[in-house]
Image: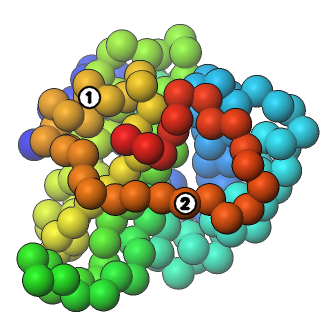
């Protein structure tokens, strides 16, 4: 499915040693879409670091990183394999949740996110992950729609303190 954006870019699976890069990408992604409260971002980064490490170790969280020729990380995307009950239209577990799709500003508009999405979707097909979901920012919506993602009937209620949601992330 995926085509390589450039011969100079390589993709590799992230490891536990990449945790800080994954945390940085998540923080930068939220900052770029409008969550710019430094204290809230720092707290989220700390909680995410604690959450993601055991999920990487168990294989429940898989991430792929795009590398420039010098070995620096230019982009990344992740897949959280969620234990999901059987549905009439799918056998059940796992359900893939794509998250933390992020490209550093200097490397945007070169097809890296599309390529990473292709890698993840190919992995899902090969590993019999039948349903894949994601939440889209306004910036990513056209890409995901071009890959076949559609809106669903999912609804949400927030029972905790009301938080401002720039761009209504998660409602898409």
Residue placed most toward the observer, 136 or 69? 136
Task: Estimate the x, y position of residue 104 in percent, counting from the top left.
Answer: 55, 23
- The residue that disc 1 covers is 143
- The residue that disc 2 covers is 157
Residue placed most toward the observer, 135 or 154? 154
Image quadrant where one finds the N terminus: top left
Q: Residue furthest right?
A: 39
Q: Decide if residue 79 is on the left or right side of residue 105.
A: left
Task: Place residue 166 in its image quadrant.
Answer: top right
Q: Is residue 94 positioned above or below 79 on the image?
A: below
**Label 2, residues with CA under 10 Å away: few <14, some 14-19, many ≥20:** few
Check contact, mark 2 vs mark 1: CB within 8 A.
Answer: no
Q: Residue at x 37, y 41 (%)?
A: 172
Q: Residue at x 26, y 36 (%)?
A: 144
Disc 2 on helix, strand or loop? Answer: loop
> How many labels sit on residues?
2
Residue placed most toward the observer, 81 or 172? 172
Q: Decide if residue 140 is on the left or right side of residue 167.
A: left
Q: Residue at x 79, y 40 (%)?
A: 41
Task: Place residue 159 in its image quadrant.
Answer: bottom right
Q: Residue at x 65, y 25 (%)?
A: 34
Q: Decide if residue 91 is on the left or right side of residue 103.
A: left
Q: Which mark sits nearer the N-terminus, 2 or 1?
A: 1
Q: Which mark is residue 64?
A: none
């Amino acid at each position: 499915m995926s085509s390589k954006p450039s011969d100079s870019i390589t993709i590799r699976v992230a490891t536990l040693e990449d945790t800080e890069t994954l945390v940085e990408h998540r923080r930068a992604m939220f900052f770029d879409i409008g969550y710019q409260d430094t204290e809230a971002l720092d707290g989220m980064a700390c909680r995410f670091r604690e959450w993601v490490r055991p999920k990487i170790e168990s294989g429940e969280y898989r991430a792929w990183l795009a590398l420039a020729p010098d070995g620096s990380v230019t982009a990344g995307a992740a897949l959280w394999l969620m234990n999901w009950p059987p549905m009439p239209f799918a056998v059940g577990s796992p359900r893939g949740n794509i998250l933390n799709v992020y490209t550093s500003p200097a490397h945007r508009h070169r097809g890296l996110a599309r390529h990473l999405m292709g890698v993840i979707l190919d992995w899902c097909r090969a590993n019999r992950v039948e349903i894949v979901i994601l939440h889209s920012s306004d910036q990513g919506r056209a890409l995901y729609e071009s890959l076949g993602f559609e809106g669903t009937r999912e609804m949400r209620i927030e029972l905790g303190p009301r938080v401002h949601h720039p761009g209504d992330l998660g409602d898409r």
